[in-house]
Structures are given as structure tokens and as C-alpha cells.
Amino acid sequence: MIKVEIKFSETNFIQEENIQSYELIRNLFETEEKEFQERNIDYINTGQRNINALMRAILSDWLMEVSSQFGFKRSTYHLSISLLDKFLSIEVNIPTNRFQLVGVTVLIIAAKTEVLL
């Protein structure tokens, strides 16, 4: 049996770290809720001039193939699509030659969150 001694100063630090983590997560959820309320649902028809729904569907299929080839979880794919939609609703006039780059970038970001979680 291993005996672990924790001094009061260490427990105080752990409690403060938990409070900071809680505040960070709460802030992230509040920001996400605000962005959810302000999003442009019809961004393909109203904001994007160079990208249409068919191009998004083709990119989504390609992202699914890449996700399965690299063995990512399905949640990683769904997060990448969510990030793609968020980016496309905010950023307008994305050139078609950069669209796949945007797709692989959101997949990398989603994969990083899979590793962290």
C-alpha cells in the first residue's frame, strides 16, 4: 500500500485549478450558445458565392473517407462538419481552390480535440 501525503497548500492549488477549469468551460459554453443564436443557417444560399451545397456534400464525403482511413472516431467527423459549417457561416467568399484546405484543417482541429479528450 502506498501512502500519499498532500499538504494543505497543494490541495488549495488543486481546488483553484478546478475553479479555473470550471470557469473556462462555463465561458466556452456561453460563447458557443451565443454563436449558436447568431449563426446564419442558410449560409450556402445567402453568404457563399463560390461554394454550393453539392460541393459541401462532396467535401463531407471525402472527410468521412479520410476519417475512416485514419481511424478517427465518428464524433471527430461530426465535429469537423460542425466546425466546417461554423466557418462557412462566418467567412464568406472562400475560393473553391481553398475549400478542400478548409476541410482538412477542420478535420485536423477535430482530431486534436479527440486526442485531448
Image: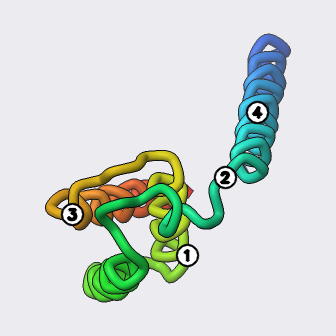
Left or right of residue 50: residue 20: right
Q: Which residue is mark 1?
A: 75
Observer-nearest of 42 and 2? 42
| Count of numbered tags | 4
Left or right of residue 111: residue 10: right
Q: Tell me which residue sits at (26%, 63%) in the image.
A: 99
Q: Separation of disc 1 and disc 2 at Cα?
A: 22 Å
Q: Tell me which residue sits at (60%, 66%) in the image.
A: 42
Image quarter in which the C terminus is found:
bottom right
Q: Nearer the viewer, mark 4 or mark 3?
A: 3
Image spot of residue 107 (x, y percent): 36, 64
Q: Which residue is mark 2?
A: 39
Q: Residues within 10 Å of mark 3 (few under 14, many from 20)?
A: few
Q: Separation of disc 4 and disc 3 at Cα?
A: 34 Å
Q: Nearer the viewer, mark 1 or mark 2?
A: 2
Pointer 4 or 1: first along the chain? 4
Image spot of residue 65 (x, y percent): 30, 88
Image spot of residue 116 (x, y percent): 50, 53
Observer-nearest of 14 and 7? 14
Q: Which residue is mark 4?
A: 27
Q: Is residue 3 above or below residue 106?
A: above
Q: Which residue is mark 3?
A: 96
User: Which residue is at the far top?
Assistant: 9
Q: Residues within 10 Å of mark 4 (few under 14, many from 20)?
A: few
Q: Tell me which residue sits at (75%, 18%) in the image.
A: 13
Pointer 3 or 1: first along the chain? 1
Pointer 1 or 2: first along the chain? 2
Left or right of residue 78: residue 25: right
Q: Tell me which residue sits at (20%, 57%) in the image.
A: 98
Pointer 4 or 3: first along the chain? 4
Disc 2 residue type? Arg
